[in-house]
């Protein structure tokens, strides 16, 4: 397992801001991310937007003080459990650091925070063809949600909205 140190990001710290931007840029360029660099306008809005969003929760992984991974999360609420939840929106480990347990450590940190804050679950989405991530998530206990057998499994759907 990696010696990476996992920290909750403080987006008021410039070094944490830069780490988040660096890691999300790497993820954006990855084929399982956007497959292209982050748009400059998005990059400019990202940190202010994360700071303004009331439920932002980010975990950073550092190896020898260098950022190597992150989990961008948002707190939500389950109406059926009447308890909070944490959604992992992005999980990133730099390509050269994959396979060393950093993703596993990030997931464990998110789970520990969720348990400590009384959450009923941790949710995430994963690209269908991202077999490496799917294997990691399965090993950490993530499964397709099924709330009632007759309803079948839960699917994540998206409707993109045109910019206004």
Image: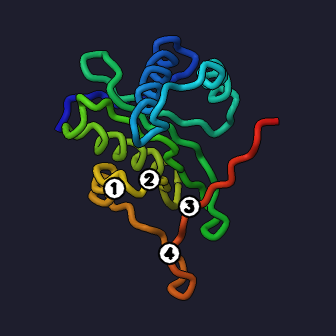
Q: Secondary structure at mark 1?
A: helix
In the rendered structure, are the residues bearing label 3 and label 1 in contact, judged by CB atoms less than 8 Å apart? no
Residue 54: x and y in percent read: 68, 36
Q: Nearer the viewer, residue 119 or 106?
A: 106
Q: Which mark is residue 98?
A: none
Give the distance between the C-alpha atoms of the residues marked 3 and 1, in whole angstroms.
15 Å
> Which mark is first along the chain, 1 or 3?
1
Residue 22: x and y in percent read: 44, 20
Q: Which residue is mark 1?
A: 134
Locate the N terminus and report the quarter of the image it occupies: top left
Q: Residue 30, relative to residue 37: is it above or below?
A: below
Give the distance between the C-alpha atoms of the residues marked 2 and 1, in whole angstroms.
7 Å
Give the distance between the C-alpha atoms of the residues marked 3 and 2, in whole angstroms.
9 Å
Q: Which residue is mark 4?
A: 153
* Residue drawn 45% across the image and 35% down it: 35
* Residue drawn 27% across the image and 37% down it: 102
In the rendered structure, are the residues bearing label 2 and label 1 in contact, judged by CB atoms less than 8 Å apart? yes
Color encoding of the figure? rainbow
Residue 23: x and y in percent read: 42, 26
Locate the C terminus and report the quarter of the image it occupies: top right
How packed is label 3: few (under 14 Cα within 10 Å), some, or many (20 or more)? few
In the rendered structure, are the residues bearing label 3 and label 4 in contact, judged by CB atoms less than 8 Å apart? no
Residue 163: x and y in percent read: 77, 36
Task: Specify the farthest residue to the left.
Answer: 1
* Residue drawn 53% across the image and 77% down it: 147
* Residue drawn 58% across the image and 17% down it: 12
Q: Residue 156, relative to residue 47: is it above or below?
A: below
Q: Which residue is mark 2?
A: 126
Give the distance between the C-alpha atoms of the residues marked 2 and 4, in whole angstroms.
15 Å
């Amino acid at each position: 397992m990696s010696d990476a140190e996992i920290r909750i990001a403080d987006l008021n710290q410039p070094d944490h801001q830069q780490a988040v931007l660096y890691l999300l840029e790497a993820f954006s360029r990855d084929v399982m991310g956007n497959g292209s660099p982050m748009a400059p306008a998005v990059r400019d809005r990202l940190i202010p937007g994360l700071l303004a969003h009331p439920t932002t929760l980010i975990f950073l992984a550092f190896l020898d003080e260098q950022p190597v991974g992150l989990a961008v999360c948002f707190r939500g609420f389950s109406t059926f459990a009447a308890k909070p939840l944490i959604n992992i929106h992005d999980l990133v480990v730099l390509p050269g650091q994959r396979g060393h347990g950093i993703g596993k450590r990030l997931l464990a940190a998110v789970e520990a925070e969720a348990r400590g804050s009384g959450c009923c679950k941790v949710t995430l989405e994963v690209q269908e063809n991202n077999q490496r991530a799917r294997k990691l998530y399965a090993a950490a206990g993530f499964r397709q949600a099924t709330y009632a057998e007759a309803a079948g499994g839960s699917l994540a759907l998206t409707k993109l909205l045109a910019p206004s």
